[in-house]
Amino acid sequence: MKQILKTTLFLSAIAVIAFAVQSCNSVKPIDKTQLGGNWVLKTLQGEDAKAAFAGDLPSIGFDFERNSVYGSGGCNRYTGAFTLTEKNEFSAPNLVSTMMACIHANKEPQFLTALSTPNLAVSIENGLLTFSQNKTVLIQFEKGAEKAVLTAEALAGKWNLTSIAGGDLATLFTNKIPTMEITADGKVSGNAGCNNYHSTYTLDSNTLTFGPVMSTKMACPGLQGEQLFTSFLTTPLQAALDGNKLTFSKEGSVVFELTKAE
């Protein structure tokens, strides 16, 4: 009888230990709704973000409909496809970014390299979004302020093109750098690099939808850049305003950026 009791107690202890081990090894998948919104860099490989970035801080956002991740690297905009497994392993190995020359000293290359590391462990705790590799924290984000809803009055003014997807300004625009003037009453006009253009726009939830683009028909050498610029105005674009910088994106990818003319 005593032997049976000992055996029973032993088996019960084994079952408890096995259950505890299984519980420790189980990972609860992150609720994707927790990842919504704008996240701003807090630390990069243990260094405070404000020490690593003299200008704007990097950010990250998630688009689960298109399985894409996007944000700012501190200077350039980046985007790319990502995967997030049920074990909370994140991979975005093929991030692409704009190629603007950065004014402020920053560690944008290190940030993008860290974020591109395969199979990063992701966790959300105490308001922090953490990416780790082998239990070493590489990147931490904290929830940033939600993007303000833009108004036509905020967009109004004269803007100069500073970057465009598909090439650099000096190569694409050998005559003039494109400009854009936006008015609060729904009109947009400017120079596309050679010809003057004008159109209309509607603004809805930070998305601009342009009307037909009308332009002059001057013959200029190298119209490739002008055609690229005006082609972006044929589809709705998402606008983001950060100080004197106006960014237009399509499906999470930046198509061009402008700065406000003084």
Image: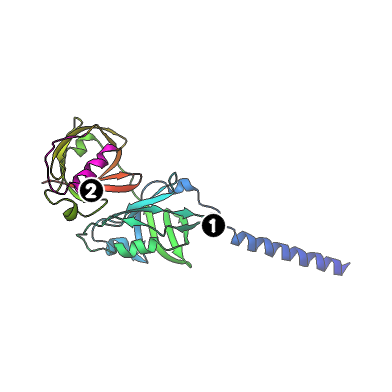
Residue furthest to the right? 1
Residue at x-position 11% and y-position 49%: 175
Q: Nearer the viewer, mark 2 or mark 1?
A: 2
Which numbered circle lies on residue 139? none
Residue range in magenta is 213-234
Q: Which residue is mark 2?
A: 257
Q: How is the image coloured?
A: rainbow
Q: Is residue 83 magenta?
A: no
Q: Amino acid at mark 1?
A: Lys
Residue neighbourhood size for the residue with mark 1, other residues' Cα within 10 Å, grouped as few (<14), some (14–19), many (≥20): some
How many numbered discs, if any? 2
Residue 151 or residue 182, whichever sits in front:
182
Give the alpha-carbon distance from disc 2 to disc 1, as whole Å: 37 Å
Q: Is residue 219 magenta?
A: yes
Residue 6 on image: x %, y %: 81, 68
Q: Amino acid at mark 2?
A: Glu
Quarter-of-image position of residue 152:
top left
Q: Is residue 252 above or below residue 88?
A: above
In screen coordinates, is 115 left or right of 189? right
Which label's residue is closer to the chain start, 2 or 1? 1
Which numbered circle lies on residue 87? 1
SS type, badge 1: loop
Looking at the image, can residue 98 be seen?
Answer: yes
Residue at x-position 38% and y-position 46%: 37
In screen coordinates, is 90 left or right of 212? right
Residue 257 on image: x %, y %: 23, 48
Residue neighbourhood size for the residue with mark 2, other residues' Cα within 10 Å, grouped as few (<14), some (14–19), many (≥20): many
Residue at x-position 54% and y-position 57%: 87
Q: Are marks 2 and 1 in contact (CB under 8 Å)?
A: no
